[in-house]
Image (tube, rainbow, N blue to C red):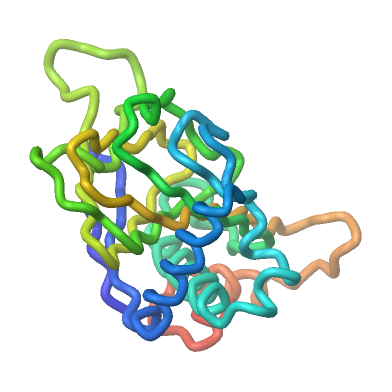
Amino acid sequence: MDIERLELFSIPVWRSRIPEMEPHDAELDEWIEYEWQQGSFQRGAYGYGYQSPDNLYVPAVLDGSPALQTLKRAFQERVMAVLKQRVNQSVKLPPEAYAFTAWALVQTNEEWTNGPWHDHFPAVVSGCYYLRVPETETEGEGALAFMRPGTPDAFSNLIDYVKPRQGDFIMFPSNLLHRPVPCPSATGLRVSINMDCYIHWAHWNEDGKPQPDSEEWMARVRDSVNPISPRGTRR
């Protein structure tokens, strides 16, 4: 699994490809556009484009979609991979991915699609899989914009951008403020599936859970940060 780490304001953003999605992309893209044409998506639900309900990863939807099953599995694998880069106190706590949400976004060239900065907290890692990225007259259109945390100053960029390509999967910390840049010159649709992963950090002493001994606990911690550990990669 090849994951490129990009540094924005000394904060990691990750870009990768999902080769196993290639057989599914066309069918998934057609399904999303069909649902959008049928009016199944809410216009400006969160200030951007046309969004589906955030239920694409619930069992009732997943069971009938090998494409979404593949995408969710790829997201989970990549989340666990990038969590091996964690620092500070969370290094001492093994992560468990306990919930996923996903929704489709269709962005047109309509002017109203520009919306507010937002984050996805309390999720820990968020991702965007780009099924379709239209050509535009300027490079910045349709990019994913991020805002630097903290107070603005005269010496650091406040905003930075990642320009997606079709087939890109971009992940970022969920508490990072972001928004898609409008694409007014686009002649086609910008189509993505956006998703969040919620993490539970396993603690030493939790009510209702068996307490591991110190040796077992340290083995769990080592596994969770060891990229070559078979047991760690299954978490």
Give the position of the C terminus as an image quadrant.
Answer: bottom right
Q: Residue furthest front?
A: 38
Q: Is residue 150 left or right of residue 36?
A: left
Q: Is residue 13 left or right of residue 192?
A: left
The spot of residue 22 in percent (x, y) is 34, 81
Foreground of the two, 132 or 207: 132
Give the position of the N terminus as an image quadrant.
Answer: bottom left
Quadrant of the rendered image containing residue 68: bottom right
The spot of residue 150 in percent (x, y) is 35, 20
Q: How many marks?
A: 0
Foreground of the two, 215 or 171: 171
Check the image and report above or below for 224 versus 124: below
Q: Residue at x 61, y 56 (%)?
A: 101
The spot of residue 218 in percent (x, y) is 59, 70
Foreground of the two, 35 or 47: 35
Q: Is residue 188 left or right of residue 235?
A: left
Foreground of the two, 83 or 226: 83
Quadrant of the rendered image containing residue 78: bottom left
Q: Residue at x 32, y 14 (%)?
A: 151
Q: Residue at x 57, y 34 (%)?
A: 45
Q: Residue at x 58, y 47 (%)?
A: 39
